[in-house]
Image (cartoon, helix red, strand yellow):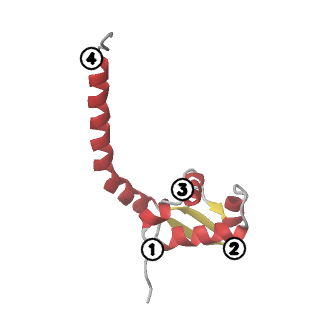
Amino acid sequence: MNLRRDPFQAIADPTRRAILLLLASQSMTAGAIAANFDTARPTVSKHLQILTECELLKQEQNGREVHYSLNGQKMKEIADFIEPFRMIWEDRFNKLEEIMKNYKPTNK
């Protein structure tokens, strides 16, 4: 049985989020990605496998090397899901800011 991984569970891990940030600007090999972490390469490879299985990363074979890059469509799906929550919190913070601007402390 082939179970697909949950992308939200995948991005809950700080190392995987760091990998996504690394790949935001350019594609990289597993070795180049691993060089940015103080963990064993197999550990980074496992993170890459998880991110690939939930389709957050794409793999492209280039000779003997595999280059990883972000899957923009899947990242957009996540951003679209999160957007309404961001708007709710932004509205709440704006209201709090307005209250704080009008707050006058009472002297005792």
Question: Which numbered disc, 3 or 4, marks the residue that appears first in the sequence?
Answer: 3
Expressed as whole percent of the image width and height from the top left, the position of residue 76 reads 38, 56
**Three-letter amino acid code at the position of disc 4:** Asn
Q: Quadrant of residue 19?
A: bottom right
Q: Quickly name the residue at label 3.
A: 17
**Mark 2 Cα within 10 Å, few/some/many (few <14, many 20+)?**
few
**Three-letter amino acid code at the position of disc 2:** Gly
The residues tagged by marks 2 and 3 sit, at their Cα atoms, a distance apart of 27 Å
**Mark 1 Cα within 10 Å, few/some/many (few <14, many 20+)?**
some
Residue in the image at 48% along x and 59% along y: 12
The residues tagged by marks 1 and 3 sit, at their Cα atoms, a distance apart of 15 Å
**Mark 4 Cα within 10 Å, few/some/many (few <14, many 20+)?**
few
**Three-letter amino acid code at the position of disc 3:** Arg
Residue in the image at 71% along x and 74% along y: 64
Expressed as whole percent of the image width and height from the top left, the position of residue 1 reads 43, 90
Question: Which numbered disc, 1 or 3, marks the residue that appears first in the sequence?
Answer: 1
Q: Secondary structure at mark 2?
A: loop
Q: Quickly name the residue at label 1.
A: 5
The residues tagged by marks 1 and 2 sit, at their Cα atoms, a distance apart of 28 Å
Residue in the image at 65% along x and 66% along y: 44
Question: Which numbered disc, 1 or 2, marks the residue that appears first in the sequence?
Answer: 1
Image check: 15 left or right of 96? Answer: right
Image check: 95 left or right of 44? Answer: left
Q: Quickly name the residue at label 2.
A: 63
Q: Quickly name the residue at label 4.
A: 102
Image check: 48 left or right of 30? Answer: left
Question: Which numbered disc, 2 or 3, marks the residue that appears first in the sequence?
Answer: 3
Q: What mark, if any, has residue 105 been given in the picture? A: none
Question: Which numbered disc, 4 or 1, marks the residue that appears first in the sequence?
Answer: 1
